[in-house]
Image (cartoon, helix red, strand yellow):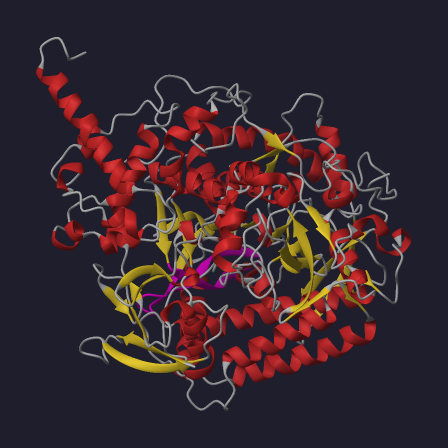
Amino acid sequence: MIFDVLIVGGGGAGLRAAIAVVEADPGLKVAIVSKVYPMRSHTVSAEGGAAGVIGEGDTLDEHAYDTISGGDWLCDQDAVEAFVAEAPRELIRLEHWGCPWSREPDGRVAVRPFGGMKRMRTWFAADKTGFHLLHTLFQTSLRHQEIQRYDEWYATRLIVDDGRVHGVVAMDIRTGAIEALAARTVILATGGCGRAFPFTTNAAIKTGDGMSLAYRAGVPLKDMEFVQYHPTGLPFTGILITEAARAEGGWLINKDGYRYLQDYDLGVPTPTPKLRSMELGPRDRLSQAYVREVERGRTAETPYGQVVYLDLRHLGEARIEARIPFVRELCRSYQNLDPVTDLIPVRPVVHYMMGGVHTDIDGATPIRGLYAAGETACVSINGANRLGSNSLPECLVFGARAGAAAAREAREAPAAGERAVRAQGADERRRLEHERDRRDGGAERIADIREQMQETLEEAAGIYRTRDALDKAANRIAELRERAAAARLDDHSTAFNTEMVAALELSSMLDVAETIVACALNREESRGAHQRSDFPARDDGRFLAHSLAYRGADGGPRVELLPVTITRWPPGERVYGR
Amino acid sequence: MITLQVSRYRPGQDAEPVFQDYEVPLRSDWAVLDGLAHIKDHLDGTLSFRWSCRMGICGSCGMTVNGEPRLTCGTFLTDYGEGPIRVEPLRGFPVIRDLVVDIDDVLAKLAHVKPWLIREGEELPLTAEYTQTPAQLEAYKQYSMCINCMLCYSACPVYALEPDFLGPAAIALAQRYNLDSRDQGDRFDLLATDEGVWGCTFVGECTSACPKHVDPAEAIQRYKLTAALTSVRNLLPWGRS
């Protein structure tokens, strides 16, 4: 059995890719391998919306400009142009598949404002947009019985020979069986890696698996230093309070009740939201303003760190219930407060990875037959800072593109190299069985090493960075990698061994952590989400370029630069609120 | 500290599930899931359970807590006083290991009801949407909120006795599409059967168990009415189209 297209990951990008494959050619053999059931994928947690030009007076060029300036000119502009042109079609396609988009009174799809966007162009399904989008895709995928699923299978290795991918090796989590799955093409759609940090909106499953699979196979990871902190997470849990709360009119205030963003070149406060201004500035700038507020002593102390407040009280119960009911539900269930009457304590929280597997505009990587899409990939349309509501359409547009491109290639690609599949499958089986059996490790647990990795990253690769801290972190992560290889496993059984999965995930996150630190060290400038206190200015002369982190011969990362593609928007100043 | 009495079942090792006690810190903001994660990370790496988003939307972490089906991410330790708290796998499902159950049967039932938008004739071009007023959206919205957490199946006394019963979430999902103004499909033959809505004895446990207020019981009752009317119409000579 040889699959034409094998997709790793069953979230927004993976499901969209699978449907694109069967639409291109129902005769192709396509499968989704995912460590969770599709509807558990993290797309489900996206709240605020999905951007696509539809409103009167809006243009594709304006969406492109907002995205490019939001990304501090690190986006590839040809990719952005394709993205903004295809996003509306993809969102309408979802509508045709039944997505319950929120509506205007006359029955047309409604749009709302969003951070960093000059026009209202964010489609939404109340504030459970990702949930509805994922379930619509999943349910639509059920109509296509050709799509085979390996639910709760964990892919651990890409089979690559002679510069071409030939499949993956994966473990059936339920039974512990390890199998080589042969395929002509493979699409990685495993999402991001927020769990490499201690405080994140990301679900437990977001451990950078696809990034690590590609990196180990020789594909560079691109722009890994660009880690997005979302300005409004709940303390302790890190649960996201959507940007839509600010788009609907919410204010960010410090402990004195002052709308502090006015002090950080983000405009002047107005009673109702103004686009590209104040609370609707971009996420990187808002998270950086929080750090400055902490330094000025104007934040409030809690057991889980310093917080500012999100004030929704003036919106009133009716508007909160109609437009952001999930915000209220989350605050009541997880923070024991009601935003109708109480302030919401918030702080910046790791949310999204701008970087990822290096691909071209069709999701193709340098390895023939290997594609990536969604947060796993870096095309790049997000540059140095992603705008809110661009990630869901990114999953759709580039999931569809990768699916279509893989379908085309599968019809021409040679049959998977049987010998490589057999040999590498056997090799990986030996490695995993050895991992599972290891009993003689030291006293250290997987969770202890994971926590130390997370703290190391937060300290060195957080909102502000310096060479000294990054140097130390690089050494520390190399040391943690050695300790992880010797850590002890309590569980040696085969059935649903989640400790073994955790050990494999830790090893993925350590790959990702190394590349984040190496890229951050190499980029001696400040741009978007990457702020170097020792190099506070943007330096287009040296760094109007992507970072490419390759796995070096010694196992450590080697960073090269690749010029950014500029089409129509030469680098300029990022202006918000004025 | 509070005691969690956790059901353990390791195939090949335990002949049947046994309880194991663990002491975990009793913190006001800890959910039962945080207690389980504490066990996994610090006390016993062999305990297996599913979880992911820990914000009540991915549907992974359903378990039986002190006898009731609950999402463990949204069920707090302090809700149980001094404890102990008994944590078991969702009832009504085969146990794979520890707190992990086999949900493939329900997955197949969800797929069985044709949970996708069915249209006759040509699709609209990708430049236009089907219009749907807020009131038309409201007509099915509640049924679109199901997160597939399986709590309703665990609570359902019929499903426990009749494994062929389509069950609450699948019927609610069918109604989600039946009531969608854009849908032109016919799911009558799938739903108006003994395994479908007529299997339900209207106990309403599903609705009490639902953490998302989907109200599957109402979905089932409403479809019984639809089904009855349709059956009567089909019997009348002028009723058939």
Residue A453: % across, % down: 62, 75
User: Percent position (x, y) of residue B186?
Assistant: 25, 25
Q: Is residue A423 left or right of residue A123?
A: left
Closer to us: A323 or B176: A323
**Quadrant of the frame with the C terminus of chain A:** top right
Could you say which quadrant of the image residue A318 lies in?
A: top right
Q: Is residue B54 visible?
A: yes
In x, y percent, where is residue B219? 27, 36
At 54% across and 82% down in the image, what residue appears? A485
**Residue drawn at point x = 31 percent, y = 42 percent:** B215
Whether residue A155 is in magenta: the answer is: yes
Identify which residue is drawn at 88% across, 63% down.
Answer: A535
Disc tally is 0
Q: Which residues are magenta?
A: A152-180
Choose between A72 and A29: the one closer to the eye.
Answer: A72
Residue located 25% across and 41% down the image = B217
Q: Nearer the viewer, residue A503 or B149?
A: B149
User: Magenta segment, principal secondary structure?
Assistant: strand
Question: In the rendered view, does A442 fall on the left or right side of B162?
Answer: right
- Asked whether the viewer can see residue A423, the reply is no
